[in-house]
Amino acid sequence: MGPFETSESCQEWKEEYELPFDVIPDEDGTIFKKLSNGWVPYTLLVGSDGKVVLWESEFEEEGFAAVVEKLFQEPTDAQAEPEAAVRAVPQRAGRGLGANIVILGGGAGGLVAAHHLRRKLSGRDRIILIDRSPNHLFQSSLLWHAVGQRRADQIQRPLSDLTRKGVEFINEEVVEIDAASRQVRTKSQAIDFDFLIVSLGAQLRPDEVEGFDEMALNLYDLEGTAKINAALDSFSGGTVGVLVTDMPFKCPAAPYEAALLVESFLRKKGVRDRSEIHIYTPEHQPMPVTGTAMGEAITKVLHKRNIQYHPLFTFEKMDPSERTIIKSGGEPQKVDLLLAIPPHRAPEVVRSSGLIGSSGWMHTDPHTMATEHEGVYAIGDVNSIRLANGKNLPMAGVFAHYEAGVVAERILAEIEGKPATATFNGKGYCWLELGDGKAGIASGNFYAEPEPAVRLYPPMHPWHWGKVLFEKWWLRHWF
Ligand SMILES: Cc1cc2nc3c(=O)[nH]c(=O)nc-3n(C[C@H](O)[C@H](O)[C@H](O)COP(=O)(O)OP(=O)(O)OC[C@H]3O[C@@H](n4cnc5c(N)ncnc54)[C@H](O)[C@@H]3O)c2cc1C
């Protein structure tokens, strides 16, 4: 545990999450310094035989070996190939030589970027984060919230807490982004920027589906997952449907995780034998971007848990009066409890500000995250990044997180007048939560050619603990 933890807080972690191993504090930060890439700690689980059995950050064997090796070395900064040309930071009259860095969105990407920049920049540089929500939500825990394993207050943190760290927070809706005149506008003010990071995520549009509010519960927001939890509590048997209404959607694993968690929930509640669980999705296989083997592995798990899978279900409409969902050219499917993922669109402000490309999303350089506008970067779900296999980089927090680090490094370099060298390499990972305290993990290089090189690690308890620890770390580390 990091340098801010005490023996007591470590013990609390152990008890709260019923961890079968000891948690000890890293009082003077020695371990953090050796086992981190500067801001993201690698989390190691060491077996009773003294061997490391898990580490999280990059789940690769080479990386794994490198971390162990790093224990015995002085930390060095990983540098990619230097690039030439740096941009002079404008010196604005009346504000000294500091830069104005504006970050739109305090979700996964915006939060990491703000933190990283603040740690490295001097106080004369302003970091201003704008979000219409007062809270940061750790979205992957929504699924645990849906099955009653988390309360809403356990998976959110107030963004105003960032002011303690020197980040200015404006809790307002962004209504215009003027990249040419280097200004963003909220409902009440205009803010100039030297650098802009757009991390506004994907906008959920349940309103595009007629009958959604009457028939479906939104799996992707807090209000929806609270309702799902209440509905599951009073569920005494019937048909549960998990529906993907449209593509793309964030976290390709989420519908499968949701179905598996619900299956485990109903089994523990004693109503599984009176229930059917169905997944309806337009995809031709689970997590198609990761390849056939991954799809087959997940399908096998679904089969084993008696979850009916309906791929190529191109959703057309729902009929709340009959409680049915219908795919184009298909028969109505009756569903008693419908958990739905609404259509995702680029945020309205990004569209109305003329910042989207032909894909309907923002376009950036896939390595530097730079847009065509000088000093304007975009990270996370708001982007569409085409991979070598013709599919898109999935919308996932892990990518928003790593991209944020890259953009922060590049902005720092520009401010310091050094060559910007940091690049995003397409590496990432994703947990697949199965319920019953188990998870699988998929990890690899999504920029590999001719297609992503992603490996699935079989389900086991430590992956689940890894996910729990990551959640705890995330919500403590950034706030
Ligand atoms: C159920 C679920 C499970 C998931 N599980 C995982 C997982 O296991 N692993 C993983 O890697 N990813 C997971 N994800 C995906 C992950 O949460 C997102 O990909 C990630 O949050 C994207 O980060 P972002 O910064 O691009 O956008 P977001 O985190 O969505 O942040 C966008 C922010 O912008 C703000 N905003 C939007 N418009 C405006 C506006 N006009 N004005 C002001 N503020 C605005 C929003 O309030 C929000 O705070 C999951 C998502 C869900 C829903």
Image: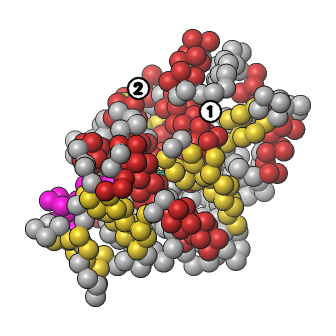
Magenta-colored stretch includes residue 144: no
Crowd around label 2: few <14 · some 14–19 · many ≥20 (10 Å): some
Quadrant of res 217: bottom left
Position of residue 11 relative to residue 290, above or below, is above
* Location of mark 1 (residue): 120
At 62% across and 33% down in the image, what residue appears?
120
* Location of mark 2 (residue): 161
- Locate residue 47 relative to residue 285 in the image: left or right: right
Q: Which residue appears farthest toward the left when viewing the image?
A: 321
- Towards the viewer: 409 or 324: 324
Position of residue 242 relative to residue 132, above or below, is below
Confirm or deny contact between disc 1 and disc 2 (CB under 8 A). Answer: no
- Figure label count: 2
Q: Which residue appears farthest toward the bottom when viewing the image?
A: 329
Quadrant of res 338: bottom left
- Locate residue 172 relative to residue 264 in the image: left or right: left
